[in-house]
Amino acid sequence: MDKTFEKYQKRRLRSSYISVVVSIALVLFLVGLLGLIVLKTKSITTHFKEKVAITLFLKDNVSDKDLKTLQAELKKEPYTKSIIYISKEEAAKKYSEEIGEDFVAFLGDNPLKNAIDISLNSEFVTPELMLEIEKELMKRSIISEVSYDKPLIELLTQNINRLSFWMLAFSGLFTLIAVVLINSSIRLSVYSKRFTIKTMQMVGATKSFIRIPFIWKSVKLGILGAFVAFVGLVAFAFYVNNAIPELEILADYSIFGIIFLIIILLGILITFLSTFFATQRFLNLRSDELYY
């Protein structure tokens, strides 16, 4: 009879541990998924921002020396990612291919200008900064015009700001949900051992002596749950990458390293704090209050 009861208790204990690990893993998986979306959104917005270019149209009388000097100076500017020089002949040839007609032969002259396309670093792609860059460039005597798509920049900036706000809001919400759900699972696990806690306390064990094994056990469950969540997240990422390769979700492995650290730290921190306060509560209860 005693052996049967002991086996039953061990099964209950294992079941309790498994339910805690599963709960932690599911919640941390959702948090990790949101983190992946947030970090990937940043890289995607950076990618699109760095596609933005400013075109400098040069005056016709620019010498080769002045052109090379301008290119060297532009390369040193903090906002420059890369520059491409496009001669008026190259521009005319490309435009003729697009329209399917040699417009230079028709007009008898090439009305296009020599130009330089500047690809910008993402942090400079805002309406205010680009306006400052435009004003600075127009001070150069060999530049006749500065051109870029202002409505597109304003729309891009507004959408990115809006997306960042909602991502921040969802991150806070998911973190709160993670704390509440994991805390509930840990509290239930500790609640099932409340009589053991009180018995140890009654025979003279100190609070820290009683608390440490519970905290250590919960932290190990938190780490295990975090590993399970990360494995699930990586499997999900591989699936999405195969289904939608355009997203390039596996292009940057450092993102997964960051997410792994976040998940592990969250698993440890939440389980530690939840177990500490749960054990503290039962340590402070009187024996007759354990039944309620």
Image (tube, grey):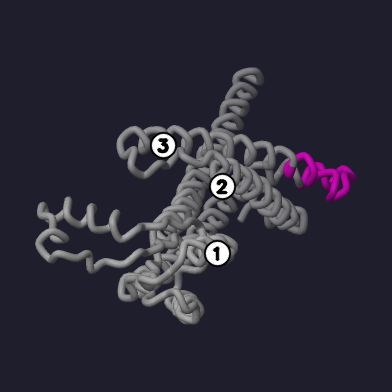
Q: Position of residue 252 (x, y in %)?
A: 51, 41
Determine whether the residue tagged by mark 3 lies in a helix, strand or loop.
helix
Q: How crowded is mark 2: few (under 14 residues within 10 Å), some or many (20 or more)?
A: many
Determine whether the residue tagged by mark 2 lies in a helix, strand or loop.
helix
For image coordinates 75% across by 45% down, the residue present is 197
For image coordinates 31% across by 75% down, the residue present is 151
Magenta-drawn segment:
198-215
Between disc 1 and disc 3, whose residue precedes?
Answer: 1
Looking at the rendering, in which quadrant would you find the C terminus? Answer: bottom right
Instruction: Check disc 3 and report the residue beneath it.
Output: 236
Q: Which mark is residue 217?
A: none
Q: What residue type is labelled 2?
A: Ser
Vertical order, 55 against 45 (above or below): below
Mark 1–mark 3 contact, CB under 8 Å? no
For image coordinates 48% across by 76% down, the residue present is 137
Query: For this rendering, which residue is in front, 142 or 153?
Result: 142
Instruction: Check disc 2 and report the residue beneath it.
Output: 185
Instruction: Check disc 1 and report the residue beneath it.
Output: 69
Between disc 3 and disc 2, whose residue precedes?
Answer: 2
Query: For this rendering, which residue is in front, 46 or 287?
Result: 46
Query: For this rendering, which residue is in front, 156 or 219?
Result: 156
Question: Label 2, label 1: how many angstroms apart (C-alpha)?
Answer: 67 Å
Does the segment drawn in magenta span residue 208? yes
Vertical order, 212 against 108 (above or below): above
Q: What residue type is labelled 3?
A: Phe
Q: Where is residue 97 in the image (x, y as percent from the top left)?
A: 17, 51
Query: For this rendering, which residue is in front, 207 or 212?
Result: 212
